Image (spheres, rainbow, N blue to C red):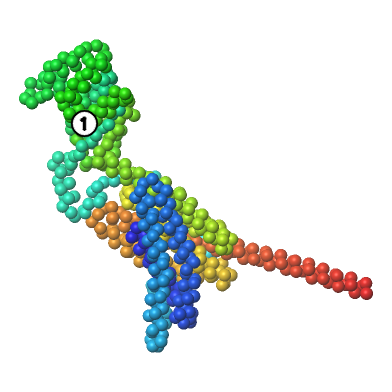
């Protein structure tokens, strides 16, 4: 959340200062410049903020609580950022500059577009090229997006606790030592089996399952040893004389077990009696078997599992089902590692599913606003399409760089939409402002890039460099997020600059065509009205 808030706050501040300086450079007094600049920037900033907040609030519909919390906190952060940047920054700037103005020490305002050497000329040149020959730029963007979209098919998802540990810390060194010495640390993995304990097939399957775990070649890759807890192990322990001191062998239970297994099939009543006798002697049976006389029994199997290979842990359920000789649907494997995978995968999948919902929500908000204000809902498409292309390109770039799609990097969806839509809205609003004043589609695009484009460049550089510092974090997860966020910001700027001005130039030309058509129609109607008046006047003179 702080990353998204910082990125948008910097942009809001730069946009507010940029409009203020433009009015100052045009000759306005400090108070007037602050008032006019704030009036010009308030609408696009509020629209961008509302769209971002709505996009974040979509997370409230997720069944994963942490995703909803992220949406609430992120939405509050964006709202607070907007309020502060529309009040504190203009107020502070006005107080300082009015004092300097009263003392005669106020320096001429320097537009944001001239803050970096050559940016003004570069923006003007790019604006002319994009508006006069937009096809090569649009084709290039679409081609790159298509290639990266194809590359995104190779994007893999993974989670490792090591990504959340400092790369230069002692804990990671200890884990590496364990990996080298004994193949990594272990944990207890459990398998929950729903089956009737007194059935022949269940006991045979449990015996074969135990034998499979004794064989390193047959047991699951994540298994670090044989079964340690099993209902079948307890039965064998009480009915088999191993001759070892301390075993639980009981001759009476052995005789009862022989009677129960004397036939081709188990004697269910005798097996139930055996279970009752073992339970009376050994309370440990209650931990490995829930004997439901009225329904299906629940059997717990437990074995040591290695945590060193995330891939093997993810495949544990499938491999356990492959070893089990009975109904695979009756088995459920679980462990701390598996639970963490399930939780993170669920969050990641929900984030992925919410991409379409978030984009649709942003599109609806923008379409409603543009329809309500200028009766042009199509402008919402111009604002959202570049953001969709940014998302595809970012995922493809992650695949090429080998950055996995994790719970951390999946948050990039909110960042892409928040910053991407913010940039496109600024471009659209400024173009409409310049087009209304100039009525020239190409010149309006050039002016938009020279002013707002320069401000967006400053905002993008500041945000990308600030977030990019995370690439030097000792945490691998933070490194990946920092790199991905910087790439997202760069793509958002490039796509908004290369796609929005050409699209708005077409929109401006269409508006001029509509205006010309309406004017010609009005002139035609006026000619008809004049002709009718003239004919009526002639008829009146002839009758007189």
Residue at 29 percent of width and 23 percent of height: 293
Mark 1 surroundings: few (<14), some (14-19) or many (≥20) residues within 10 A: few
Relative placement, left or right, of 538 versus 42 is right
Q: Is residue 34 left or right of residue 520?
A: left
Q: Is any atom of residue 434 visible in this view? A: yes
Residue 125: x %, y % from top left: 47, 69
Viewer-nearest residue: 282 or 113: 282
The quarter of the image holding the C terminus is bottom right
Extreme residue toward the bottom, this view: 104
Q: Quadrant of residue 95?
A: bottom left
Q: Residue furthest left?
A: 245
Where residue 68 sits: x, y (%)? 38, 51
Question: Taking 350 as reference, is 280 above or below it?
Answer: above
Q: Nearer the viewer, residue 66 or 385?
A: 66
Quarter of the image where one finds residue 188: top left
For residue 200, above or below residue 305? above
**Residue labelled with disc 1:** 287
Residue drawn 37% across the image and 61% down it: 77
* 493 lies above or below 296: below
Whether residue 321 can be seen here: no
Question: Residue lying furthest top in this view?
Answer: 263
Q: How many marks?
A: 1
Residue 434: x and y in percent read 53, 70
What is the secondary structure assignment of the residue under circle 1?
Answer: helix
- Quadrant location, the N terminus: bottom left
Q: Nearer the viewer, residue 448 or 102?
A: 102
Residue at image coords 26%, 32%: 191
In percent of width and height, residue 376 lies at 57, 60
């Amino acid at each position: 959340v702080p990353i998204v808030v910082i990125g948008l706050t910097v942009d809001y501040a730069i946009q507010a200062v940029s409009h203020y300086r433009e009015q100052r450079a045009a000759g306005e007094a400090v108070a007037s410049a602050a008032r006019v600049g704030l009036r010009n920037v308030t609408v696009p900033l509020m629209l961008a903020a509302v769209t971002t907040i709505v996009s974040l609030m979509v997370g409230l519909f997720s069944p994963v609580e942490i995703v909803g919390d992220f949406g609430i906190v992120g939405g509050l952060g964006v709202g607070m950022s907007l309020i502060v940047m529309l009040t504190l920054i203009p107020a502070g700037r006005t107080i300082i500059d009015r004092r300097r103005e009263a003392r005669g020490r106020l320096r001429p305002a320097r537009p944001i577009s001239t803050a970096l050497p050559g940016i003004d000329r570069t923006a003007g040149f790019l604006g002319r090229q994009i508006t006069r020959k937009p096809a090569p730029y649009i084709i290039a963007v679409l081609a790159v997006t298509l290639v990266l979209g194809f590359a995104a098919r190779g994007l893999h998802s993974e989670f490792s606790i090591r990504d959340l540990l400092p790369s230069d810390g002692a804990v990671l060194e200890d884990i590496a030592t364990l990996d080298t010495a004994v193949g990594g640390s272990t944990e207890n993995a459990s398998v929950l089996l729903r089956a009737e304990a007194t059935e022949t097939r269940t006991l045979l399957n449990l015996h074969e399952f135990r034998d499979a775990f004794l064989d390193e070649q047959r047991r699951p890759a994540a298994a670090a040893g044989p079964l340690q807890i099993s209902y079948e192990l307890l039965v064998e322990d009480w009915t088999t004389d191993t001759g070892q001191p301390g075993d639980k062998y009981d001759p009476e239970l052995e005789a009862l077990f022989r009677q129960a297994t004397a036939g081709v099939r188990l004697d269910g009543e005798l097996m139930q009696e055996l279970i009752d006798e073992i339970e009376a002697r050994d309370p440990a049976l209650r931990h490995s078997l829930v004997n439901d006389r009225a329904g299906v029994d629940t059997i717990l199997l437990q074995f040591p599992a290695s945590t060193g290979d995330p891939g093997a842990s993810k495949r544990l359920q499938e491999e356990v089902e492959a070893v089990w000789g009975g109904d695979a649907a009756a088995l459920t494997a679980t462990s701390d590692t598996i639970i963490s995978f399930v939780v993170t995968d669920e969050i990641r999948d929900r984030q992925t599913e919410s991409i379409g919902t978030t984009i649709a929500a942003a599109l609806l908000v923008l379409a409603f606003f543009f329809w309500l204000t200028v009766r042009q809902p199509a402008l919402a498409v111009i604002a959202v399409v570049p953001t969709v292309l940014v998302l595809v390109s970012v995922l493809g770039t992650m695949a090429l760089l080998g950055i996995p799609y994790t719970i951390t990097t999946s948050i990039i969806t909110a960042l892409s939409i928040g910053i991407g839509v913010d940039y496109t809205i600024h471009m659209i609003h400024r173009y409409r402002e310049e087009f209304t004043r100039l009525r020239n589609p190409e010149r309006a695009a050039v002016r938009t890039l020279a002013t707002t484009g320069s401000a967006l460049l400053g905002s993008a550089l500041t945000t990308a460099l600030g977030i990019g510092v995370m690439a030097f974090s000792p945490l691998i997860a933070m490194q990946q997020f920092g790199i991905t966020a910087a790439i997202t910001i760069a793509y958002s700027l490039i796509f908004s600059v290369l796609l929005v001005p050409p699209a708005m130039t077409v929109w401006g030309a269409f508006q001029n065509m509509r205006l010309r058509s309406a004017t010609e129609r009005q002139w035609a109607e006026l000619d008809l009205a004049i002709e009718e008046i003239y004919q009526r006047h002639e008829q009146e003179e002839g009758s007189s």
